């Protein structure tokens, strides 16, 4: 089954997205026809994962333009300004969000006197192109990354960097999918990924859809498995890669990277160029989202910690480039990542 994380419904003029808050207990698609709605979906993690957030925000702009297209030029322009602002404010860490908004700004900027319906059409075409390009990038990354994995390997991953986190195929899980397609025998070890459980709920679900062997562990078990010689490689995605190769990814990634280095296990990062922020010299500058305390005190309706306990909930951490064996992009593999190697991806 091909996972369609985002799907344009031409009949209703809505962008439909899998509700990732309720998987795997339920499979629901939710439809959106405004920037405000898409921004709320990003914030509440109906849609999550850096490339998927980028695509969702592009459609958020496109649906808003269609909604406002009967306004006169200046009312349309100020409505669109508000749409860009509300989407930019939805989540701070994944740079794909800002990359996507900038691309749509450029499309609008090229049509300063264009009638709103024509601008709306152009924005929708751009969103479609970005969706298709993301799948193509993941396929290219998959082929390059698959070559790095041995014929038979137990591969640990953290969070969900799969089809659900992208427009399709996935980044880290895309590499695993491509390796399996190439006949390699890959067994996935999925970190549960507290507190939102992207590993337990989403990575496991995705792997099971395709009969790729997967074993679930809690986040505090990876050190033990590595020490026992039961992990051959680690592969993760990224929300933002700085110019020097430091990268932000789901909280807990840094811990896994330190452990992998301690045990001499290759640690790979798979991320498209849209996740690379060349404006930031190092990972110290990456903004880290702090989410609600309720996500740590319990999950869903379930509460297990005292309601008044102080909580920290940073959603991401930063892993220094020195712990990364290779950065896999659609444009090539940089291993280990350096500022020069990363700049060459854009040459
Ligand atoms: O909070 P999330 O679920 O949006 O975090 C997602 C991750 O950390 C992913 O690993 C990252 O976005 C890469 S997705 C290809």
Image: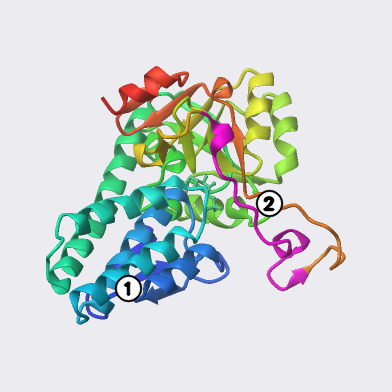
Range covered by the magenta-colored residues:
282-302
Label 2: how many residues lie within 10 Å, few (<14), some (14-19) or many (20+)?
some
Looking at the image, which residue sits at the far front?
74
- Please tell me which residue is depicted at 86% across the width and 66% down the height of the picture: 308
Residue located 64% across and 44% down the image: 251
Residue shown at 70% from the left, 53% from the top: 313
Q: Quadrant of residue 3?
A: bottom left
299 above or below 219?
Answer: below
Residue 81, how many percent across, how many down?
Answer: 34, 66
Q: Quadrant of residue 8?
A: bottom left
* Residue situated in front as seen by the camera: 86 or 276: 86
Nearest the camera: 192 or 124?
A: 124
Whether ligand 1 has any atom under 8 Å from the Cβ at mark 1 is answered as no
User: Cβ of disc 2 within 8 Å of ligand 1?
Assistant: no
**Residue at the disc numbered 1:** 79
- 180 sits left or right of 255 in the view: left
What is the quadrant of the C terminus in the image? top left
**What is the secondary structure assignment of the residue under circle 1?**
helix
Q: Residue at x 47, y 24 (%)?
A: 244
Q: Is residue 293 magenta?
A: yes
The span from disc 1 to disc 2 (Cα, nearest Å) is 38 Å
- Across and down, in percent, residue 282 comes to 52, 29
In the drawing, what numbered circle is on residue 194? Answer: 2
Is residue 25 visible from the viewing direction of this image?
Answer: yes
Q: Residue 91, position in %: x, y?
A: 51, 56
| Residue 63 visible at all | no
User: Is 253 in front, or is 217?
Assistant: 253
Residue 115 placement (x, y as % from top left): 12, 71
In the rendered structure, the answer to whether residue 94 lies left or right of residue 178 reads: right
Residue 207 within the magenta-colored segment of the rendering: no
Of the numbered discs 1 and 2, the one sitting upstream in the chain is 1
């Amino acid at each position: 089954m091909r996972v369609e994380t985002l799907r344009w419904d031409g009949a209703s003029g809505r962008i439909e997205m899998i509700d990732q808050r309720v998987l795997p207990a339920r499979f629901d698609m939710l439809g959106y026809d405004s920037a405000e709605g898409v921004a709320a979906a990003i914030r509440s993690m109906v849609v999550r994962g850096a490339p998927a957030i980028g695509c969702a925000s592009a459609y958020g702009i496109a649906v808003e333009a269609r909604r406002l297209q009967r306004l006169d030029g200046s009312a349309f322009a100020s409505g669109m300004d508000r749409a860009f602002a509300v989407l930019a404010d939805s989540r701070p860490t994944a740079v794909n969000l800002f990359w996507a908004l900038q691309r749509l700004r450029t499309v609008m900027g090229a049509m300063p006197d264009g009638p709103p319906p024509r601008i709306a059409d152009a924005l929708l075409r751009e969103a479609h192109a970005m969706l298709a390009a993301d799948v193509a990038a993941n396929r290219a990354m998959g082929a390059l990354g698959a070559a790095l994995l041995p014929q038979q390997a137990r591969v640990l991953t953290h969070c969900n960097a799969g089809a659900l986190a992208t427009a399709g195929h996935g980044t880290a899980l895309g590499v695993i999918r491509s390796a399996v397609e190439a006949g390699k025998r890959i067994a996935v070890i999925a970190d549960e990924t507290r507190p939102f459980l992207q590993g337990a709920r989403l990575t496991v679900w995705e792997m099971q859809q395709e009969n790729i062997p997967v074993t679930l562990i809690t986040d505090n078990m990876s050190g033990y498995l590595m020490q026992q010689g039961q992990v051959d490689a680690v592969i993760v995605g990224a929300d933002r890669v700085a110019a020097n190769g430091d990268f932000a990814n789901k909280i807990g990634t840094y811990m896994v990277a330190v452990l992998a280095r301690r045990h001499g296990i290759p640690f790979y990062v798979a991320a498209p160029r849209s996740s690379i922020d060349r404006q930031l010299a190092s990972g110290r500058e990456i903004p880290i989202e702090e989410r609600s305390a309720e996500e740590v005190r319990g999950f869903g309706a379930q509460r297990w910690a005292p309601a008044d306990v102080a909580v920290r909930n940073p959603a991401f951490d930063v892993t220094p480039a020195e712990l990364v064996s290779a950065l896999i992009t659609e444009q090539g593999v940089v291993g280990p990542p350096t500022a020069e190697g990363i700049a060459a991806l854009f040459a």
